Each structure stands twice: as C-alpha cells, then as structure tokens.
Amino acid sequence: MITAYALQGRADGRVVAKGAGQSMDPIYGENTVFVIQPVPFESLKPGDQIAYRAPNGDMIVHALMYQSPRGWVVKGYNNPDPDPYLVTRQNFIGWVEATFEPAADPPAH
C-alpha cells in the first residue's frame, strides 16, 4: 500500500500536509492527508484544488473559483463565501495531487 510520504518522495518539491476544519466538507474531512505537487502558476484553471499560504503562514487547501486581475479567488466547498485572500504567484504552493483519508480508530473492546 502506498503512503502519502512514499508518494512525496517520488518527485521533487512535493509536500505532505494534514487538513483541519470543515471548509472542504463533504469532499475532504478532518485530518485528510494531502500530497501537494508544485505546478506552473500559469497552468491553473477554475475548479483546481490547490494549496496556498495565508498571510499568517498557514497552508490552506481550497478550490479555485476564477482568476481576477490580482490573483485567483478561492473557496472551501463548505464555506459560504470566498477566502479573504487571493492566490498569487507569491503564496501559491501547488496542486492537490493525491489525498489519503485518516485511518479509522479501532473499535473499543
């Protein structure tokens, strides 16, 4: 079975990150593990699921809505409004290449 870290090691620049929150429900739940692949900024298109850095340094994984003159507008699937930050060349990390669901807790005995 392939793991996120094994996949990360198969290409330069890949990043593994663990999700938090409900902004991408119902597609991605709490603790989903993301493998982020760097791609050219010019290759982005609406609907792509991408990772970027918020001004406070947090990595955010959301979907691209549309490109404005100043950057991409992004939104979590479960959020009512777009993010307050635009995705630009400077804060863009990469495209979601793969996801892994967290392992279920074993049943209590």
Image (cartoon, grey):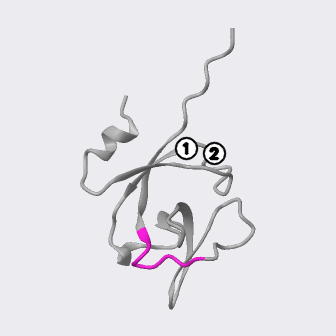
Residue at 35% in and 40% down: 5
In the image, the segment drawn in magenta is 85-92
Q: Secondary structure at mark 2?
A: loop
* Image coordinates for residue 23, horizontal then vertical, percent: 67, 57
Q: Secondary structure at mark 1?
A: loop
Mark 2 touches mark 1? (CB < 8 Å): yes
Q: Amino acid at mark 2?
A: Gly
- Whole-angstrom CA distance, mark 2 to mark 1, is 6 Å
Residue at 50% in and 65% down: 57
Would you identify the image quadrant in which residue 83 lies? bottom right
* Image coordinates for residue 63, horizontal then vertical, percent: 56, 65
Q: Amino acid at mark 1?
A: Thr
Prevailing secondary structure class for the magenta stretch in the rendered image: loop
Indicate which disc residue 23 carries.
none
Indicate which disc residue 32 carries.
1
Residue 21 lies, with reference to residue 46, above or below; the image says above
Question: As drawn, is 79 to the left or to the right of 100?
Answer: right
Question: As drawn, is 78 to the left or to the right of 41?
Answer: right
> Circle 2 sits on which residue?
29
